[in-house]
Structure formats: C-alpha cells, structure tokens
Image (cartoon, rainbow, N blue to C red):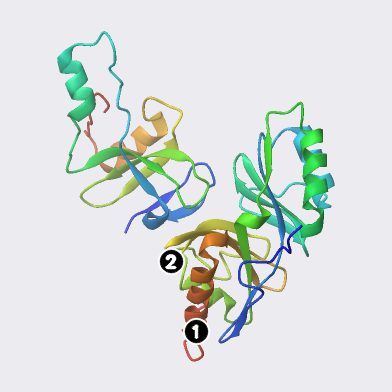
Amino acid sequence: MSDAVSALGGVSFDGIARIEECGLQGMITLRGDLSDQALAAAVTRATGQKKLPEANRARVAGESGVCWMSPDELLLLVPYEEVGGRLEALVAALKDSHALAVNVSDARAVFRVTGDAAREVLAKLAPVDLSRDAFQPGRFRRTRLAQVPAAFWMEEDESFRIVCFRSVADYVFKLLKVAAQPGSKVGVL
Amino acid sequence: MLILRCPYCGNDVDETDLAPGGEAHIRRHGPGSTDAELTDYLFQRENPRGVHFERWRHAAGCGKWFHAARATDTLQVFGTYSAQTTEPPQEIRDAITKARPGWSWREFS
C-alpha cells in the first residue's frame, strides 16, 4: 500500500498565532437519527466519548472525538490507522438503523491554531462571533473561511482545530498565514 | 448585511454563509392545471417593498433549508421557521403584525 500523507506534509507558521497542519486524522462522517439509542451507543464506542455532543458542540480528546455537524450529521474523529476497523464496527452496529457512515479521512485537511491571538486569526476569516462571551471551549461551528467551507472547534486550552476540504488545504493555510502575520494583531478579542 | 438565525442549528448566520432560495410558499401547478396557473407558478413572483417571505439554505453550515420573514425596505427580520410548512406559522404572523399592522403578502395576512 502507498504511504498516506497529509495534504501539506505538516507545514507550520509562526506569527501572532501558530498555524500547524495536523497531519493524518481519521474521520468518519455519519448521517442518521441522532436520537437513536443504537446510533449513540455505536458512536460512543467508536470514539471513546461518554455521550454525543449537544448541538453546535464537539467532544474531542486528542485524536478521538465527535463533532455535531447538523441535526442529522456527526463527524467522528478516530486515529488514522484505526479508521478502517472502527468504520466496519460502526456499520455493523448500525445495520438496523437508517444511517450512513463513510470514511472521509483522505478528503479533508486539519489545521491547529494556537496562541493568544488564535481567536483573532479566525475572526478575520469567518463571519462568526468569536468573542469570549460567545465562543467557549467545546463550541463547534461550521462556516466558511474566506471563500471556502470549513468547520472548527475550540479546545480546552483555547486553541482551535480547523477541518476543511483537502483540495483547498493550501488556500486555507495561506489564508491563516496572512491572518496571523506578525504585527497584524487588532487587539479587540 | 443580513443576519438570520438558522432554525435548525440555532446559529446566527451571516448572509454570506447562506444561499438564497427565492420566494417562499409557492404552490406548484403541474399536469392538469391551466396555462395561466402554470405561467404564474413558473414566472410570477412578488417584489414587495416591505414584508416578504423567502427561502434560504444554510449552505456553509448545517446545510438545511429554512424560511425567513423579513422586510425588504428596512432589513428587519421578523423571524425564521421550518421549511416543512406550506404557510407561515402563527407566531411569525404575530411578530409581523406587531411591527407592521395591516400587512398582507399573497394570500397571507
């Protein structure tokens, strides 16, 4: 089998915040009835989380977790090497439910934005209220970064993780670099 | 700039995250209808200065279609509501009446 590589090979940039490409991340997109007990049990088993996240929230620990994408969609994060096995187990557990699970790991790119100005860097690119009152750790939001769709959530240490399509990874990295240019701090968030 | 609250994910969403879906509550006229009905269904649209009902899709977010009631002249938003309905719910009509007594739009008032 060929060597799997992430979109940008783990590039990074240091400005008013640190931008890193995270490398390979296993991702499963799951559509179904989120109130279905069988679905909830299968998802928690696959991701090691105790329960499903509430609306607009993510429950993530390291490389594993669940993100709420829409009223009928979840994004499951699992270690890249384990995605095949976890997906098989998930599909088997959901065979009696009206649900669809697909491995999308290689269709996506993941970035991390850390540092005091991480909120500002994202606020420059997305039409989202990122003030401390409005956006807290655990919050998840699907929106756009400049001209492309993206989703991000805030970790406990107030850093962000961003998921975008792999085909626009280079564009998103360049956007983040410009937004994090040294000396570009606005100082309002 | 227009900010609408998506009734499905609950987020206050900027216009640039949304895709416009045109006029709301259009009743389909297909086989068996008269030429006049079909013409109206295909081509006739409201273009009011004031209360208007529209469809929007939360395209960059949860991806769901929803309805919005707003004023085209002031950009006041009276409310957003589910796409699974053929007419505006009573609370939306009440909200419009409160701001604009005597309003009417197509067969609704």
Residue at (51, 64) in percent of width and height: A168
Label 1 marks a residue whose chain is: A
User: Where residue A146 is drawn, which disc sits there?
Assistant: 2
Q: Is A54 left, or right, of A183 in this rendering?
A: right
- Number of numbered discs on residues: 2
**Residue A28 location in percent, x, y?**
70, 49
User: Where residue A187 is drawn, which disc sits there?
Assistant: 1
Q: Secondary structure at mark 1?
A: loop
Outermost residue to the front: A1
Outermost residue to the bottom: A183
Other residues around mark 1 within 10 Å, as few (<14) / some (14–19) / many (≥20) = few
Other residues around mark 2 within 10 Å, as few (<14) / some (14–19) / many (≥20) = some
Query: Counting residues from the N terminus, which is met first, the one under dot 1 or under dot 2?
Result: 2
Mark in the foreground, 1 or 2: 2
| Amino acid at the residue labelled 2 | Ala
**The image quarter in which residue A70 lies:** top right
Residue at (24, 37) in percent of width and height: B101
Q: Is A78 left, or right, of A29 in this rendering?
A: right
**Residue A117 location in percent, x, y?**
57, 81
| Amino acid at the residue labelled 1 | Gly
| Quadrant of the snapshot with the N terminus of chain B | bottom left
